[in-house]
Image (cartoon, rainbow, N blue to C red):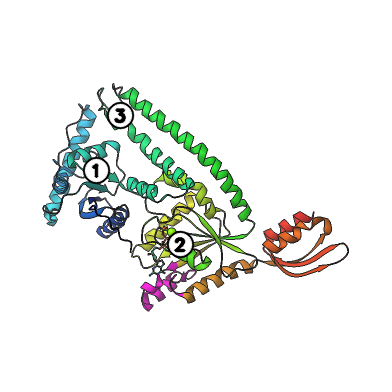
Amino acid sequence: MSTTTTATPRPRAVLVGVQLHGVTEAELQSSLDELARLAKTLGLDVVARVTQRRDRLAPAAVVGEGKLKELAALTGGSGVVPVGPPSKQREEEAERAEAAETERAEAAEAERGETPAEPDAPRASVVVVDHELSPSQARNLERATGAEVLDRSAVILAIFQRHARSREARLQVEIARLAYLAPRLREGGGGKDRQGGGIGGRGAGESSIELDRRKVRDRIAELRAELASIERDAGTRRKRRHEHATVALVGYTNAGKSSWMRVLTGSGVLVEDKLFATLDTTVRALQPESVPRILVSDTVGFIKKLPHDLVASFRSTLDEARDCDLLIQVVDASDPSFRAQMEVTGEVLGEIGATESPRLLVLNKADRLDAEAREQLAAGFPDAVVLSAKAPADVAALRERILAFFERDMAEAELFVPYARQRVVGEAHSAARVLSERHDEAGTHLRVRARPEVLARLRAGLA
Ligand SMILES: Nc1nc2c(ncn2[C@@H]2O[C@H](COP(=O)(O)OP(=O)(O)OP(=O)(O)O)[C@@H](O)[C@H]2O)c(=O)[nH]1
Ligand SMILES: [Mg+2]
């Protein structure tokens, strides 16, 4: 458990979630549990949850008028969305439909006897919404609650920003943050309200907003150029690494990837009960070292609704996962929503194009499960291994499994290396297992065991 020991009290936050059509109460609560962990990682103290069952998000402020008042009671705001600019007929119709929907939702709620959130809980200064907010929804919520309003993407971006250590990670996060902000500058930009009326209207504020957006775009281009130069080096390093057998640990945030990295490679990577503790990719050799060496990489975790800009931005970091020989997908099997988390991981892997490599599923944190649950998992996922990063016997078992994976497709070959090509002998020693080595007057006779790609490369060096 990570504890913050700051003297200043942590800002209080209220979570807001809408139970949309087709979403169960349990799913909504588990999504809010995760949002609460994200908020906590950001240093917020979650004091209440405000939820509402609706067919869709209220266009004005996500929740209906009544709920908004309830929310504002927790933050000390007015609970009223200020009247916007004159609306056209279509908008008026939409508003009428919206009012009717709100009434229905609230009447149904009253029928179910739901109690409003406690009015005398301490006042919150932050509202965290579990849905993507439009700029106007964010602004309306801010005005009605008097609190700072963040959506899920903004929280994730803020966490990434805090946890980014290397220059590469910092650039990636900054690009994603600006890309997230750019479209949101359209309405509220420059602190000027839309004087000319209407979304996208030619208000007096337009030119300065356009200027801001251009500045943001220019800055993104600048950062991208800098990132590209760093990534060129990283790309070369990655290519060099690819001469070795590589394993990438991937999975949902907090699943235990870094814990496995530590125990498999003896490295001191950060392990924390925090979301997105790891942002930078670390690569280390499997320990005790095998011949040839196997490299293991640990990288950024995934989460539900991971902002697209972040995925795009972290693409090169995630190349490690795309180019590896074996993907080890780590799952926190003790988390009740692990199935949904596996699905999200599958989706992100698809998005980054990491679907080619063979995948081994590690159902982790088995030490938190009883024997029956473990058996059920093993039966439900026959190709997976049910393990705990905290059990030394399990660590040895996974290491064996990794070794066996690479051993399986290795083949033996005889190579003759003329003295003029002695470089190949060195290469054979680093990328293959040399079974025997004999010299005569013309060169070196090697008997090696290696993966087919390695054998092909060694032969190409002799051609
Ligand atoms: N009980 C138990 N806890 C574990 C196990 N593996 C990891 N943990 C704990 O789970 C938490 C997260 O572990 P990490 O290894 O940091 O997880 P991660 O997947 O690297 O997380 P991010 O880098 O934040 O995406 C830590 O508190 C670990 O101690 C396990 O097998 N059993
Ligand atoms: Mg980690």
Q: Of callouts 3 and 1, which one flags the residue occurring earlier in the amino acid sequence?
A: 1
Disc 2 beta carbon < 8 A from ligand 2?
A: yes
Residue picked out by circle 2: 258
Q: Of callouts 3 and 2, which one flags the residue occurring earlier in the amino acid sequence?
A: 3
Judge left or right: residue 410 versus residue 385: right
Q: Position of residue 128 (x, y in %)?
A: 26, 48
**Which segment is the magenta one?**
363-391
Q: Residue at x 42, y 70 (%)?
A: 380
The three-letter amino acid code for the residue at tag 1 is Glu
Q: Nearer the viewer, residue 28 or 300?
A: 300
> Of helix, strand and loop, which one carries label 1?
strand
Q: Position of residue 65 (x, y in %)?
A: 15, 42
> Of helix, strand and loop, which one carries label 3?
helix
Q: Is the Cβ of the residue at disc 3 closer than 8 Å to that at disc 1? A: no
The three-letter amino acid code for the residue at tag 3 is Gly
Residue picked out by circle 3: 190
Among the 4 quarters of the image, the one containing residue 404: bottom right
Q: Is residue 244 above or below residue 130?
A: below
> How far apart are the two marked residues, 1 and 2, measured between alpha carbons?
33 Å
> How far apart are the two marked residues, 3 and 1, measured between alpha carbons?
18 Å
> Of helix, strand and loop, which one carries label 2?
helix
Q: Nearer the viewer, residue 98 or 40?
A: 40
- Residue 429 is inside the magenta segment: no
Judge left or right: residue 85 versus residue 366: left
The three-letter amino acid code for the residue at tag 2 is Ser
Q: Residue at x 36, y 37 (%)?
A: 181
Judge left or right: residue 43 versus residue 358: left
Would you say residue 14 is visible in this rendering? Answer: no
Q: Position of residue 121 (x, y in %)?
A: 14, 54
Residue 371: mark: none
